[in-house]
Amino acid sequence: MNKPEIIKQLESIVGRENVLFNKEDVIVYEQDAFVMRAIPDFVVFPSTTSNVSEIVKLANREGIPIVARGAGTGISGGAIPVAGGIMISLTKMNRILEIDLNNRLAVVEPGVVNLELTKVVSPYGLFYAPDPSSQMVCTLGGNVAENAGGIHCIAYGVTTNHVLGLEVVLPDGEVVELGGKSLDSPGYDLVGIMVGSEGTLGIVTKIILRLTRRAEAIGTMIAIFDSIDDAGQTVADIIGNGIIPTALEMMDALSIRAVEEVIHAGYPLDAEAVLLIELEGLNEILSRSFPLVKDFCIKNRARDVRIAETEIERERLWKGRKSVAGAIGKIAPNQYTQDGVVPRPKLPEVLRKVIEIGKNRSLLIANVAHAGDGNLHPLILFDPRHPGELERVIEAGGEILKLCVDAGGTITGEHGVGIEKNKYMSWLFSEADLKAMEIIKDTFDPKGIFNPGKIFPTPKGCRELRVRPIGIGTGEKGIWI
């Protein structure tokens, strides 16, 4: 690679101020929210689809790897440039291009922050439903890449259920439009293939999103338990009896204590678990549903059940849940967040085994979960300055995912595969399954330049890749993937 010539060409596309290449500048982009690092050769900030297309054409000609990046909040290493190359940061493509109130849709660029869209349409009684815990900072382009979920996905579904159309730059630089503003498009579901493809098939430069109307009434309940088993069984009972809340979240004792120290959300410090349960609909429906949900909580030995009486109290309860990852920083300097899914009836059993893994490996694990859809998020706490601790943490994460698969679940609910879980794909898929996926990848990206080293168990068509763990500087010691 002729680096000076590549820099010159990139600067001609986006301007000198939008190209980084010195190590002290690009090192800022060596990591997302995952625990490993790798440094890109260049970081580029396009502002138009045409810019992205020209950058990709350059990379295609020169055989340079490309990684697209949003806000860097991904937790599976999807935006880590394990093969170096060009990182395309889409944060400057952050315009809301259209709000169509009659058809309840929005057209946005990929750098728009998730929560910003809801703020803009809220005065019209609308919102954008997928709401990851990082929604205050994560971008909609990143949400599309990872098929992000969130607290309310039990009722509203994940990102793919809200994407109607995409503008995409393919690996040869061609710009295509997939789907559209209608509710369904004939032919192959190319939008569905692109959503959740983790930047391995194309770079999204425009998104058409479905907006949702707010319900007449919304209520939030907190149920307090002295046993995480009882809380898990309550979840299974509620869903098993045909009640589908818009949100059904679980937090364990360690999470509760961390949040209360920082947020003061109103969770009892002596509880072993709490459930946050949200229902919405017509006032008449809520008046009938809340007593039924409360009965299931009491049946499973909830020691207290209360409904938020004001909007401020309701918002405080949810702020506590969405602040767990940040609040845990008071306990340990780093965390490794897992993302397994299990059938809801297996929730209590799997949570018990997760706790055992922590005890066996002398690791603190804070458990939070989108319990209503069986999506576990154990937060494994660690200090990277302790020799060998990161390696133990990663091994524990693998054990947790194996528990989920053995229970009939899967290795990711909303965080994606990335570099974190690609080695576990064979637990779920046969060689024939993986080969079928590779055929799709090769069809879109025959040179293998888009986000190499992600999703598939071994990097295809490129050298063995190496990344450095957090806290180990720039020396020779590292972790091989």
Image (cartoon, rainbow, N blue to C red):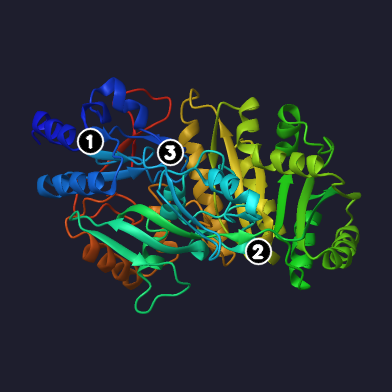
Residue extending farthest bottom: 186
Say which of 267 and 300 sits in front.
Answer: 267
Q: Secondary structure at mark 3?
A: loop
Tell me where residue 357 appears, x and y as whole percent. 61, 46
Q: Secondary structure at mark 2?
A: helix
Compare marks 3 and 1 and give the one earlier in the sequence.
Answer: 1
The answer to whether residue 234 is left or right of residue 21 is right
Say which of 97 and 151 sits in front.
Answer: 97
Residue indicated by mark 3: 72
Tell me where residue 187 appears, x and y as whole percent. 34, 79
The residue depicted at 36 percent of the width and 62 percent of the height is: 194
Compare marks 2 and 1 and give the one earlier in the sequence.
Answer: 1
Tag shown at residue 14:
1
Label 1 sits on what residue type? Val
Distance between the alpha carbons at the discs numbered 2 and 3: 27 Å
Tell me where residue 149 appears, x and y as whole percent. 55, 55
Q: Quadrant of residue 465?
A: top left
- From what the image shows, is residue 39 above or below residue 464? above
- Foreground label between 3 and 1: 1
Tell me where residue 315 appears, x and y as whole percent. 74, 42
Within 10 angstroms of label 3, few (less than 14), some, or many (20 or more) residues? Answer: many
Compare marks 2 and 3 and give the one earlier in the sequence.
Answer: 3
The residue depicted at 66 percent of the width and 46 percent of the height is: 368
Residue 475 visible in the picture: no
Q: Quadrant of residue 431?
A: bottom left
Residue indicated by mark 2: 155
Distance between the alpha carbons at the discs numbered 2 and 1: 42 Å
Within 10 angstroms of label 1, few (less than 14), some, or many (20 or more) residues? Answer: many
Label 3 sits on what residue type? Gly
Label 2 sits on what residue type? Ala
- Quadrant placement of the N terminus: top left
